[in-house]
Amino acid sequence: MPTRLAAARTARGWTQGQLMRAMRARARIDGHELPDSGTLRVMLSRWENGRHHPAPFYRRLIAEALDMTEADLGFPLPSWLGLRLPGLGTALPKGPPYPGGPFFVPATCPSAPPPLTPKHHQGPHTVSRLR
């Protein structure tokens, strides 16, 4: 059974070479160069047969070249997001997202560093003079 990527390419009537040319054109717009044609063809083949998943950079290029979303092409969410949406895994985490920002480490975490506090805090509106 073909992957959604392979199905989308063939539904558009494109060969792998045509998709690669469209990817190259899109990459050049952003100032990037892609690997040589042989290497890119092997990569595309592995993505289309499901042996590998493209990196986020290539997911975006492919989606833009085919005028589709990454989700339409069946690409999984990057693992660093820590989210799994219904239909793609598990439900969203409970509670407010990122209570202290995306790099928040709870104070109860044993590996959390001590909070940073200035030694001579003079308040937000005080200007110190250099001597």
Image (spheres, helix red, strand yellow):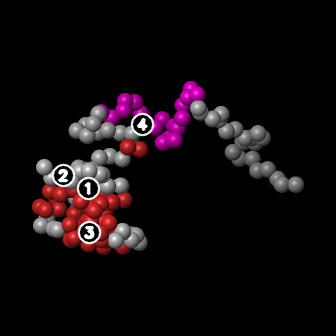
Tag 1 residue: 47
- Which amino acid type is marked by label 4? Pro
Q: CA distance from mark 1 to mark 4?
A: 32 Å
Name the residue that disc number 2 marks: 3
Q: Amino acid at mark 2?
A: Thr
Instruction: Answer whether residue 41 is visible to the viewer in this image.
Output: yes
Q: Which residues are magenta?
A: 91-110
Q: Three-letter amino acid code at disc 3?
A: Met
Q: Is residue 66 covered in magenta?
A: no
- Determine the residue located farthest toward the right in the rendered image: 131
Which residue is pictured at 32% across the width and 66% down the height? Answer: 39
Amino acid type, callout 1: Trp
Residue under label 3: 20
Task: Classify 10 Å Cα crowding around label 1: few (below 14), some (14-19), many (20 and above).
Answer: some
Q: Quadrant of residue 27 in the image?
A: bottom left
Secondary structure of the residue carrying numbered label 4: loop
Sequence-first disc among 2 and 1: 2
